[in-house]
Image: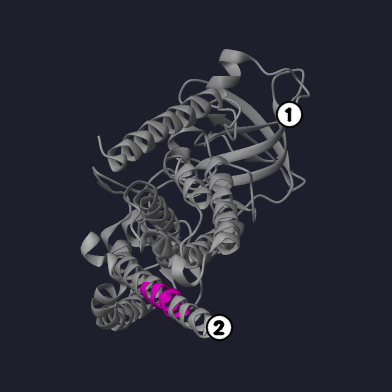
Amino acid sequence: MKAKHQRLILALVALAALIGAGLLAASALKDEAAYFYAPGDVKAKGVEPGKAIRLGGMVVKGSLKRAADGVTMSFDVTDGKATVPATFSGIAPDLFKEGSGVVAEGSFDAKGTFIATNLLAKHDERYMPRELEGMSYNETTRVLQVDQ
Amino acid sequence: MHRFANPARFLKIARPLTGWLFWSGLVLLLAGCACGLFLTPADYLQGQTVRILYIHVPAAWLGMAGWTGIAVSALMQLVWRHPLAAVAGRAIAAPGALFTAICLATGSIWGRPTWGTWWEWDGRMTSMLVLLFLYLGYIALANASARQGAGQGGVSNVTAIFGLVGAINIPIINRSVVWWNSLHQGPSITLRGSSIDMALLWPLGLTLLGFSLWFGAIVLMRMRAILAQNKVEARMQRLARG
């Protein structure tokens, strides 16, 4: 066996061990490296009230209600497996709306309502022109209209 | 590959190729950016910020492709002792780090209006930041161990091993949005097709190809510069010995 082949085998074995170690570490980190809890995770594992977490999912259509003070809002977050009620006081990002993704930072209160201290809008992987979504945009007035 | 072990033979091909890659890449990427800025419609949710895509995606691709190139040249250095492998690794590192930084910066600028935050420690962003640090580490190691003159501008085997070990981060970056809940969206372009509408997608092809050709030109320029530097050093040493 030539020295070249020995080095090749050594390098390939080292590489295989490295990839194996990386995959093991990644699967061990599966829960810890998750950026947020989905409502299904909360239901399955339970999160004690008061513990600071991030809750991520879709805002249920028709659930978003704004309080009279103008800054407080309540909405339901779902991942298809479970639904969790949430409230937030403050300025929400522009992309925060019903039927789209949200990541809320905060904690659960004793009654199981998620009290969010910060909202992030989660964008999904779909990109399309407004015209396809049944919307039209007026460049001069900067008004987005939903075609009925 | 050992046909190119002789730098003279490599340079004979690299010299004309550099110009071709540089200019065709520049034309394509400028055309792609112009089309992406003026000809495509705004996104239904993100509005005008979607246009950052035409820079962000090629930068992310080249940051990851660059490290893959470093890993391949490290393997060629360690196993086949190819004299140009280490030169290629050194040449790739700086533009790779630059494009990784561009990817992080454009992503941050996009994230503020879209997500409502400049930075979050989610899987995709963290692993991409780790890639930037890996590049900086590689550059430091390569510069410290670069042998001038007779050593043909090579880097130490430790640097090459570092390049190989760092490659584990590439699949992690790629899979980070699939394995873990993340703020960053999942992959838009997969084997099954694209969830980016054709009306928005087509300039991305131009900028991807353009930036890639340009990257190739930069790497060839840097390889030629390193080889020229070696020649100078070798001549100086010969002169010094008299």
Q: Is residue B225 magenta?
A: yes
Q: Nearer the viewer, mark 2 or mark 1?
A: 2
Q: Label 2: how many residues lie within 10 Å, few (<14), some (14-19) or many (20+)?
A: few
Res. A79 visible in picture: no
Please say if B129 is above or below B30. Answer: above
Q: Which mark is residue A107?
A: 1
Query: Is residue B62 rendered to the left or right of residue A132?
Result: right
Determine whether the residue tagged by mark 2 lies in a helix, strand or loop.
Answer: helix
Q: Are marks 2 and 1 on the same chain?
A: no
Residue type beneath disc 2: Ala
Q: Residue at x 47, y 51 (%)?
A: B160
Query: Which corner quadrant holds the N terminus of chain B?
Result: bottom left
Q: Residue at x 49, y 62 (%)?
A: B93
Q: What percent of the width, then of the height, locates residue A51?
A: 76, 25
Q: What is the span of residues highlighted in magenta in the rendered image?
A: B220-229
Foreground residue among B200 and B126? B126
Residue linked to disc 2: B240
Q: What percent of the width, then of the height, locates residue A18?
A: 45, 33
Q: Quadrant of residue B152?
A: bottom left
Query: Is residue A45 rendered to the left or right of residue B38?
Result: right
Q: What percent of the width, then of the height, locates residue B63?
A: 45, 58
Q: How many marks?
A: 2
Please say if B111 is above or below A52. Answer: below
Q: Residue at x 60, y 61 (%)?
A: B144
- Chain letter of disc 2 in the image: B
Residue type beneath disc 1: Ser
Q: What percent of the width, then of the height, locates residue A111?
A: 73, 18
Please say if A82 is above or below B114. Answer: above
